[in-house]
Image: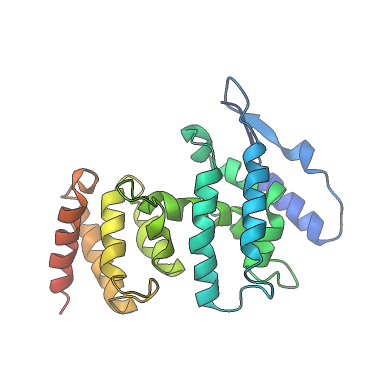
Amino acid sequence: MRYPTMTAGDANTYLVAKRAGTTTDTDSLVRVKGFGSEVDQSFVVRLREAISELRTGWPKGLNNDKERNLFEGKASRLVHAALPTDSEMICDPEFWIWLAVVHFPDLVEWRYGNPTVGTKLANYGVGSRTENLLYRLWLRAELVIDETAKDRYHLAASGQIDFYRSHLFRQGYANARNFARALLHFQYPNADPAAPKLKIVEIRELVKRLRRMRSNLFLEILPEEECRAVIEAEAALLS
């Protein structure tokens, strides 16, 4: 499949110029990768409509961590459901830069409060793939999809933004959904989906233990129930 991309360098040049008041055409910066038929870009329109409708729930913007987390939990399912499933495209950070810079700069700036000088370029994926807002939203849903549930995205509402960033994204659990879901269930077992079980220092220590243990355990093949048992056993050693 052929799909549009933008390099981090071109994105940086464009965004800096835009913030300086210089009008630049993004078309000349877009590069096409892949082979075969072109990806149907109508998903962009559908996603923009869905995100725009979601944003109406926060007419004054996102003013605290609770609101930001609630928004990202809801937005993650929209991004994941809208995106094509082509693995080469999804795995290409330059595709996500294109999506953020060309089609969703308003969302990126809105999400981060649109400070006077503009949000950090990392939030567009420049210099940090996992900080690209659109990619983070997609990955949040991707890691905790539950194909056994009527609503396969029901777990995406659970957890806090920093939990996903530090304890799922950065630990490389993309190929171990069972473990990601088990860790999410363990840390957020309460009716309030953002109320954690362990304190920050405790979950950090637990994840360190799990990371060391991972070298001797194939998490990718363990059922979720066994993953949960492993997590609980390691957590019991913290006290």
Horizontal arrangement in the rendering, residue 180 relative to residue 124 (left or right): left
Q: Is residue 61 above or below residue 98?
A: below
Q: Position of residue 192 (x, y in %)?
A: 37, 75
Residue at the far right: name it: 22
Residue at the far front: name it: 150
Regarding residue 121, the answer to whether it shows in the image is no
Horizontal arrangement in the rendering, residue 236 relative to residue 35 (left or right): left
Q: Residue at x 39, y 58 (%)?
A: 154
Q: Residue at x 61, y 73 (%)?
A: 62
Q: Residue at x 43, y 63 (%)?
A: 157
Point out the image quarter for the N terminus. top right
Q: Is residue 107 above or below residue 202?
A: above
Point out the image quarter for the C terminus. bottom left
Q: Residue at x 16, y 49 (%)?
A: 217
Q: Position of residue 141 (x, y in %)?
A: 44, 53
Q: Position of residue 21 (x, y in %)?
A: 86, 59
Q: Nearer the viewer, residue 220 or 212?
A: 220
Q: Position of residue 143 (x, y in %)?
A: 38, 51
Q: Nearer the viewer, residue 117 or 198?
A: 198
